[in-house]
Amino acid sequence: MTVARDSKTRRAQQLARRVAVRVGIIVGAIAVLFFALEGGEYGTRDLLSRTSRRAALELDVQQLQLVVDSLQRETRAVATDPGTLERIAREEYGMVRGNRELLYRFAEDMEAAGDTVR
């Protein structure tokens, strides 16, 4: 009976070793897979956040390009179009054309603009 008991004990130990080796291999494979996805300089979450940040920045660049384009059109119009230049001179600086025009400023408008009436 001792031989049978020793043989059963050895088989149980061998079985336990095999299970331990297989569990070790599975745990190692899971660790390698996790490191492949999340480890290193840039993990998966980091790459996803960078992708969304890049999309937001590209949208900002497009919006700013529209602003730049409109400012370039306005600059070109001021430099080449006398009508635009005249409109700005009238609106911003209150200029009039020669002796044929008079500029009227009303007190309400001046007070609203922050000017004082004397």
Image (tube, grey):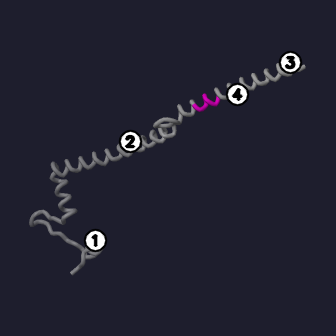
Disc 1 residue type? Answer: Ala
- Whichever of labels 4 and 3 marks the residue nearer the N terminus, that label is 3
Label 3, label 2: how many angstroms apart (C-alpha)?
77 Å
Depth order, front residue of 22/76 = 22
Disc 3 residue type? Answer: Val
The residue under label 3 is 3
Quadrant of the rendered image containing residue 90: bottom left
The residue under label 1 is 113
Mark 1–mark 3 contact, CB under 8 Å? no
Where in the figure is residue 117, as x and y percent of width and height? 23, 79
Magenta segment: 26-31
Closer to the camera: disc 4 or disc 1?
Answer: 4
The residue under label 4 is 20
Quadrant of the rendered image containing residue 69: top left
Where in the figure is residue 70, as x and y percent of width and height? 28, 48
Q: Secondary structure at mark 4?
A: helix
**On the picture, is 57 further left or further right than 16?**
left
Quadrant of the rendered image containing residue 22: top right
- Whichever of labels 4 and 2 marks the residue nearer the N terminus, that label is 4
